[in-house]
Amino acid sequence: MTTLTLPLTFDLQHVHLTDEQFYQLCVNNPELVLERDAKGALILMSPVGGESGHAELELGTDLTIWNC
């Protein structure tokens, strides 16, 4: 098992992935929340938790109930 020291920092301005490379990165790392912006830059999203995670869940539930 690999241990990481946090915070982990990357120079994301110089990371350029093809669509296939980005897809493989996502498939091989399902625990990470990865996105790309309109210019193709890689964005690592931090996980939601605590109060903000609860608020997001409540909003999603309200939207689902409203849509039914």
Image (cartoon, rainbow, N blue to C red):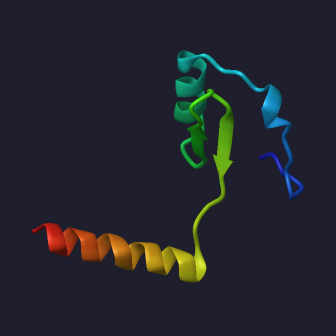
| Outermost residue, left side | 68
Residue 55 in picture, x, y percent from top left: 46, 79
Residue 57 in picture, x, y percent from top left: 40, 74
Q: Is residue 36 left or right of residue 11?
A: left
Residue 18 lies, with reference to residue 63, above or below; the image says: above
Residue 48 lies, with reference to residue 33, above or below; the image says: below
Residue located at (44% from left, 72% from top) = 56
Residue 66 in picture, x, y percent from top left: 17, 73
Query: Of 50 and 35, which appears nearest the observer?
Result: 35
Identify the image quadrant of the C terminus. Answer: bottom left
Residue 48 lies, with reference to residue 38, above or below; the image says: below
Query: Of 4 and 61, which appears nearest the observer?
Result: 61
Residue located at (77% from left, 47% from top) = 1
Residue 62 lies, with reference to residue 1, above or below; the image says: below
Residue located at (54% from left, 19% from top) = 19
Residue 10 in picture, x, y percent from top left: 84, 40
Residue located at (29% from left, 74% from top) = 61
| Outermost residue, right side | 5
| Outermost residue, bottom side | 51
Q: Is residue 9 left or right of residue 59?
A: right
| Outermost residue, front side | 38
